[in-house]
Structures are given as C-alpha cells and as structure tokens.
Amino acid sequence: MSETPPPEPKPAVQTFGLTRSYGPMLALDHLDLTIQTGDLFGFIGSNGAGKTTTLRILATFLAPSAGRAEIFGHDVAKDGDAVRRMIGYMPDFFGVYKDMEVTEYLDFFAACYKIPARQRENTCADVLELVGLTEKRGALVGALSRGMQQRLGLARVLVHDPKLLLLDEPASGLDPRARIEMMAVLHELQRLGKTIIISSHILSELQTLCNTVGIIEKGKLIYSGPVQGVRDQMATGLIYWVTVASDAARAVELLRARPEIAAAEPVDGQVKVTFADGHRDASVLAEALLAGGVKLTGLWEDELGLEEVFLRVTRGETQ
C-alpha cells in the first residue's frame, strides 16, 4: 500500500482580491499575490503605488476594505495574534529610543514579546551578531549612524525569531557601503530560512538580491514571479555585444546581412546586435564574422536590467 504524500506546504503569503480605499481613493485594487516560503520577494512600485498599504495590511496594522490576506494560512484580520507572532515588520521610518543603550533597546522589545528574562540576554546577543552590531552593544542608540540604526531596527524585528520579514524601504537613506552591508544581512537571513518581502526603489540591488519580484502600479499588480520571468516577458529581442580585432564597420555590414539579426550598430568601439524575435542562437554571429574574414574577440549577452523592465511596464502613475 503506497504512503499518502505529505500535504503541500502553505504559501508564506496569499492575498485574495485585497482592496483598500481611503474615501474615494483606491489604494489597493483587488490584489492577488502569492509568495512562497523561503522567497526573497522584491516589491516594486512608484511612491503611492500601494506597497506600504499592502505591507501594513499584512502586518495587521491596517484592515482591508475588501478581500483578505493570509500569512502561513492564518487570516490577518481574523487571527491577528497568531500572525503577529510569525512576522517582523520594519517600516520605512521607525522610532528609536535615543537615550537607551543598544542592548537595553533590544531587551525592551524582547520583553514585549514575552521572551523570558533568562533568555533575553542570549537572544539579544545573537541578533546583534547576525546584523553585525556586537561591538556596539553598549553604545547609545542615538550615537549610531543611520546605517547602524537601520541594522538595529532589523535586529529588533528578529528578537522573536519570526518566519516572515516585512521590510519597507530598509535601505532608504543609506550610503553605498551601508546598503551593501544591509543586503548581505538579508542574504544571510534568507539562507537561514526566513521569507522576506522587501520594498525598495534601488532596483539594481533588488535585481541581484531577490529571487522573485512583484510590480505594482495604482494598486494593481502588473507582474509577480521570478526576476528572469519579467525580463523575458519584456525583452523584444535578444541583445548581444560583439568586439572584433579590427574593421568594426565591416563587422556591422556582415551582421546586418544575416536574416536572424534585426539590427547591428557600432557603439563606443563595440557592436550592439539585436536578434529578430524568436532567434536565440548566438553562434550565427561567429559564423557571419568568420565567413567574412573578421576576427571575433568578444561576445556577451546584454541582460535586461530590472530598472529598464520597471520603466517599460509602468507609466509612473500613482493614486
């Protein structure tokens, strides 16, 4: 007798027709979103697109006007206590108690989550190590840099070991080094099994950080899925860059003569080649140049960046 297969794990987040209005303004318009356990999900949209409203509903701070949302199968409106135990919410701006020491600050929030006093010291030490602030444990919160305060805010939402992190613009206002350090921490948290939703305007960093993304505009979800999936949807033709030993003009002439190639143009000593729709075999580039007596020295694919994708699929409209 065959064994019954285990049930499929529930998604970390599901929304069903999630809607939120503020008087006549519709901030969320029937949002249907699914985020799987273990995803590092990038939530992309212009200011006013509905990102923060979505995160606030998932964090149980805001009630939906219609529809519903579930966190690991728990309805955020009906089972808020269970949801709050499973999430860590970090808003784009959060208050800090500047006259507290770092460990006092974390101990206060650990106590709010009813973590026993005998466990709190180790818990605070663990999260400080995770976010790279162990050396600042005795410092005053107000003396920390903006980047360190952001990492402390992340440590605060980790004290009760949540399964899901809701991070609203966690790298906002940070210098390049602090952003890199923050992204490294998020990578480590995903490796440890956390599911993470991060909203951000720094699309170049989300491109390498996230495995899935969602694009929202005027409260409507335009795309949700793998990062490469939205690139593939928006690519109008495969683009390659070519370098040759000499005679770039001759290379352009040879490449333009091939029916598989829609365009070839010289750009700063290189040749930008756009394939016709449906053609993806880059070997035809080498064949065309070799047959014409031009030596190929370099060939690489030009990936469509997330910023370019965002500009193509949105119109910059807000509520």
Image (spheres, grey):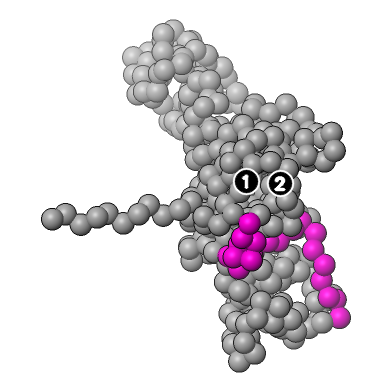
C-alpha separation, residue under disc 1 versus residue under disc 2 = 7 Å
Q: Which residues are magenta?
A: 78-99
Label 1: few (<14), some (14–19) or many (≥20) C-alpha neighbours in 10 Å:
many
The picture quadrant where one finds residue 20 is top right
- Using the image as rendered, state which of residue 35 and residue 151 is in the foreground: 35
Q: Assess disc 2: are there few (<14), some (14-19) or many (≥20) residues with their C-alpha within 10 Å of its C-alpha.
A: many
In which quadrant of the rendered image does the N terminus lie? bottom left
Tell me the number on the disc at residue 68.
Answer: 1
Vertical arrangement, residue 133 with respect to residue 30, above or below: below
In percent of width and height, residue 308 lies at 63, 31
Q: Quadrant of the C terminus?
A: top right
Residue drawn 83% across the image and 75% down it: 97
At 69% across and 82% down in the image, what residue appears?
Answer: 111
For the question of whether residue 199 can be seen, the reply is yes
Residue 179 is at least partly visible in this image: no
Q: Residue furthest left?
A: 1
Does residue 194 appear to the left or right of 57 in the view shown? left
* Tags 1 and 2 touching, CB below 8 Å: yes
